[in-house]
Image (cartoon, helix red, strand yellow):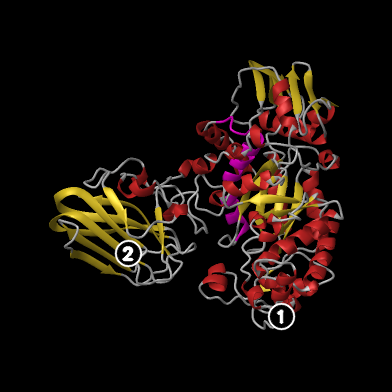
Amino acid sequence: MITCMKRSIAKLIRPRLGKAVTGISVFLLALPACAQQFVPQLLPQPMKIEMKKGEYLRLRHPLDSTLATDLRSSLDPSLPQEGYVIDVTAGGISVRSHDASGLRHARTTLCQLAAGGRLPLCHIEDAPRYAWRGCMIDVSRHFFPVSFLKKQVDILSRYKINILQLHLTDAGGWRIQIRRYPELTRKAAWRTESDWGRWWDSGKDRQYMSEGAPGAYGGYYTQAELRELVAYAAGKGITVVPEIEMPGHSNEVTAACPGLKCEGNQGAQGDVCPSNEETYRFYCDVLREVMDIFPSHYIHIGGDEAGKEAWRKCPRCIHLAGQLRLASTDDLQGFLIQRMAAFLKLFGREAIGWDEVLTDKLVRSEPSLGTNMNVMVWRDGKAAREAMLRGHNVILTPGEYYLDRYQDDPRFVPKAFGGYLSLEGLWKYAPGKLALPDSLQSGQTGHILGVQGNLWTEQITTPDYAEYMLYPRELAIAERGWSGDRLTYPQLKASILAQAGWMKANHVNAFDLKSARGDRKETLGPVTHLARQARVTYNSRYADKYAAGGDGSLTDGILGGWSNNDGRWQGFMQRGDRKKQPLDIVVDLGKVTPLHSITMEMMQFDSPWIFFPNTFRISLSDDGAAWREVYRKEQPREHLEKVSVRPWQWKGKDRGRYIHIEAGCDNPGEWIFTDEIIVK
């Protein structure tokens, strides 16, 4: 295991996150102003550091031994939670800290600062911007051994990450031993296929196998293994937060326990039945065992992406929705989430739910979600603001910054699930901008608890690949969570590059930032062509979510990158009426113009149903009334493993003022994404 600090650290008190995160601002105001020095080898950067140039304390022993014998430490309650002050002088090292966590962070900083058997003489004052600085690893889609998780604890603790969330249950497999329900790990922890695409997407096998059956793929953690992990992480200053999904993402639950399905349903079901009292008995039993393993103050209970289709046909759900005077059976999710959050409150625990817990009609009336629900925001900033205004604390984990996205040119890196998210792109995220203004804050409003990087593992099959996707981007999350927005991107990059030696020495399979090719070269500068700034008429509108620059986006000369979320790609969805093309636009060049080529770049990205058009047509007109078709292309569906961008192009010799472009998809719900109409 990766070590820098003595085993005695494991005996320090386990930190517990509180609801309010207010002490940090008081501490910042209390500090004297000074010029902030940047020290690349420190990640995250301290709030204040003053170094005496060329003056060092020679360590007579390895740093661990020096810390045990020469370091003088004391507690200072006036410092904020997790805060510390370090003074390295010719006479030795002294540390003042608010608590045991602060002392641990001080030691981590000293470990990073030491080089060549010596420490620079310095004064450091430090405390975190956010109380929650997390990393989530999905161990359901692909199972990783405890040894891998311990290694991640070692890495994350070095960078002052203090939360490791484990996504323990999902359709991919149930990963935690529950003694009351042994069938969960005997039947639902194993599946027929390791490849997620073949098992869940294209093949739609979605079958589970019994433990020990030939070819069974999966695994689970025993309660003893999880207790060992929890204790190990606590010794490194990390709280392990379990996530038990409900009511959706529960195919594995209903496969192992069919009595939790809706009345009359004999087929597969992805959501447990919210009108069945057996469902509540099941989850109460499960959560009792979960709480016995995990002392975390917070328990994540999911709440996202429930399909709810079976509920709409279930006589029992229909009856309960009527009794509760709900608008529809869909709103029974709020009923379930409230009950489970209230159950956790009986044990002094707080629930966390994905931000869909805010959307049910039930929770918009009395009683609301109550004070025992924290919201993990992944969809948009509006959800964060709504949650805080309704009195809930939030953890920010926006989907466009998920770590399962490509971090470099998709053509040269392993397959990923999401779009494109470089380190620089991740650093653009500014969680502080979502904080409520002072005018809206009150004793009843919530706060931003912190930030978290989420690694979903549909396409991540091995521990090495998981590390490749986690690092160095999770280090940027660590920096943002600790220091806020103090660093520029060049400073962040320099600091991360300074970690490469440590990463290599400790066998961390991190992505090599020095070799990054970056975004598409086409994005580096504007494209000059005849349609620049031309007016575009949309006979079919783009989706508001993917509007890019609005009505002028397709003629602004700006090309998109590898991510469909980069604000440069416009998205058009195929509606139910197949006769109406999702992409139907007319470009007005202002006058009849000689034409030699018309090009539109298209994106395909299979996971979110973005496909190249199956039909593509270009027509020209001099007056906007009489049209002549000059190009038609029909292309059967081609499934691609990676994000791809290709030009759809007419070349020839013609003239016209108006250009009419139409493109269609195979099925409702599919998307066409394009970034520019290039006319020459």
Residue 507 appears in the rendering: no
Secondary structure of the residue carrying tag 2 is: strand
Between 6 and 406, the one nearer to me in the picture: 406
**Residue type, label 1:** Glu
Residue 362 appears in the rendering: yes
**Position above or below: 142 against 108:** below
**Position above or below: 115 against 262:** above
The residue that label 2 is drawn on is 663
Main secondary structure found in the magenta portion? helix
Is disc 1 surrounded by few (<14), some (14 to 19) or many (20+) residues within 10 Å?
some
The stretch of residues the image draws in magenta is 462-487
Secondary structure of the residue carrying tag 1 is: loop
Disc number placed over residue 263 in the picture, else none: 1
**Residue type, label 2:** Ala
Q: Give the residue displayed 81% in from the left and 57% down from the top.
A: 342
Q: Does the magenta segment cover residue 621?
A: no
Q: Does the magenta segment cover residue 475?
A: yes
Q: Quadrant of residue 220?
A: bottom right
Looking at the picture, how far across and down is residue 396, in whole percent?
63, 46
Of the two numbered discs 2 and 1 on the same chain, state the one appearing first in sequence: 1
Q: Give the residue displayed 38% in from the left and 48% down from the top.
A: 550
Cα distance in 3D space between marks 2 and 1: 44 Å
Looking at the picture, how far across and down is residue 305, in whole percent?
61, 63
Q: Quadrant of residue 143?
A: bottom right
Looking at the picture, how far across and down is residue 127, in whole percent?
71, 30
